[in-house]
Image (spheres, grey):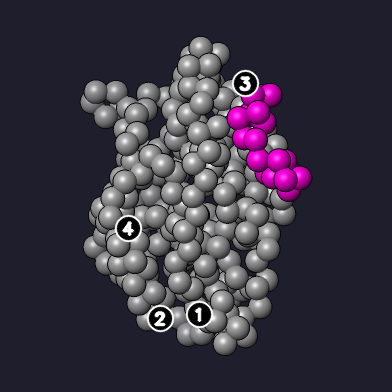
């Protein structure tokens, strides 16, 4: 807050940047090419399934800040902010696993987890610049991630739009990891220098191939994850944080 006041930064000019691994760092750098994005608050959102050394986030922040200062004049990367709401993550992704699996014949925590990553930041984004920068990418060289294909990303957009927040996916269409490295200005390999997840690879078969059932995934997304996410935020503004009770209505 001292930085904000001393530099006379208008709160409405602060954009939230999701901060985790290399794609999110590249997304913040790329988004700052926009003349209207001059101040970014990087937020790390813990899920309860991630693990690693917290110091890595500070090291990544230093790397990102150095790159921004090299590329731009009068752009500010604010200090790291951390958020965590394990009961919320549990309600969407943990509590009703068997129920979801029986109903839809498919389950992965990843899509609901990335919805959680939006939910937890939306209320703060509304108090600031009403924008969130995310490092989601449709293509990862010749691979893709179950929580980042087009239909899922459109739903995340819709979730944010519901509350007047714009989701900026500035690296969404970048296919090659080498291009991400160029943006960052550092040979940062995918999956390195970031937290790991205990569910890593959960939607892949023994050979690493994605087990993809689009119809059932979209049913889970449209009938459960999206409406329950919207309702959780609405109820939160009413002071109701009984996440399990809220989610029950959609399963």
Q: Residue at x 44, y 49 (%)?
A: 46
Q: CA distance from mark 1 to mark 3?
A: 45 Å
Q: Report the magenta residues as a range.
A: 233-251
CB within 8 Å, label 4 to label 3: no
- Judged from the image, the secondary structure of the residue bearing numbered disc 3 is loop
Of badges 4 and 3, the one in the foreground is 4
Can I make out residue 173 in this image? no
The residue that label 1 is drawn on is: 75
Among numbered discs 4 and 3, the one appearing first in the sequence: 4
Among numbered discs 2 and 1, the one appearing first in the sequence: 2
Q: Residue at x 64, y 24 (%)?
A: 248
Asked which quadrant contains residue 57, the reply is bottom left
Label 4: few (<14), some or many (≥20) within 10 Å? few
Residue 50 location in percent, x, y?
36, 44
Residue 27 location in percent, x, y?
45, 60
Can I make out residue 64 in this image? yes
- Judged from the image, the secondary structure of the residue bearing numbered disc 2 is helix
120 w.r.t. 109: above or below: below
Label 1: few (<14), some or many (≥20) within 10 Å? some
The residue that label 4 is drawn on is: 54
Tell me the number on the disc at residue 251.
3
The residue that label 2 is drawn on is: 69
Asked which quadrant contains residue 222, the reply is top right
Judged left or right of residue 95, residue 246 is: right
Q: Residue at x 44, y 28 (%)?
A: 108
Q: Residue at x 52, y 67 (%)?
A: 41
Q: CA distance from mark 4 to mark 3?
A: 35 Å
Residue 190 location in percent, x, y?
29, 51
CB within 8 Å, label 2 to label 1: yes
Asked which quadrant contains residue 47, the reply is top left
């Amino acid at each position: 807050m001292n930085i904000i006041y001393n530099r006379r930064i208008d709160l409405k000019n602060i954009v939230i940047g999701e901060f985790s691994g290399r794609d999110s760092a590249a997304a913040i750098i790329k988004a700052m090419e926009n003349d209207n994005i001059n101040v970014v608050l990087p937020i790390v959102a813990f899920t309860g399934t991630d693990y690693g050394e917290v110091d890595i986030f500070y090291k990544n922040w230093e790397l990102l800040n150095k790159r921004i200062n090299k590329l731009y004049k009068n752009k500010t990367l604010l200090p790291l902010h951390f958020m965590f709401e394990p009961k919320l993550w549990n309600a969407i992704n943990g509590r009703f696993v068997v129920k979801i699996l029986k109903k839809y014949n498919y389950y992965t925590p990843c899509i609901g987890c990335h919805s959680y990553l939006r939910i937890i930041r939306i209320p703060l984004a509304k108090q600031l610049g009403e924008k969130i920068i995310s490092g989601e990418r449709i293509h990862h060289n010749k691979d893709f991630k179950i929580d980042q294909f087009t239909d899922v990303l459109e739903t995340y957009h819709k979730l944010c739009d519901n509350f007047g927040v714009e989701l900026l996916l500035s690296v969404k269409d970048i296919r090659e990891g080498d291009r991400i490295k160029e943006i960052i200005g550092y040979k940062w390999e995918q999956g390195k220098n970031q937290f790991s997840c205990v569910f890593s690879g959960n939607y892949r078969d023994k050979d690493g191939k994605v087990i993809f059932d689009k119809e059932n995934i979209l049913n889970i997304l449209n009938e459960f994850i999206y409406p329950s996410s919207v309702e959780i935020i609405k109820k939160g503004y009413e002071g109701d944080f009984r996440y399990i009770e809220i989610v029950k209505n959609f399963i």
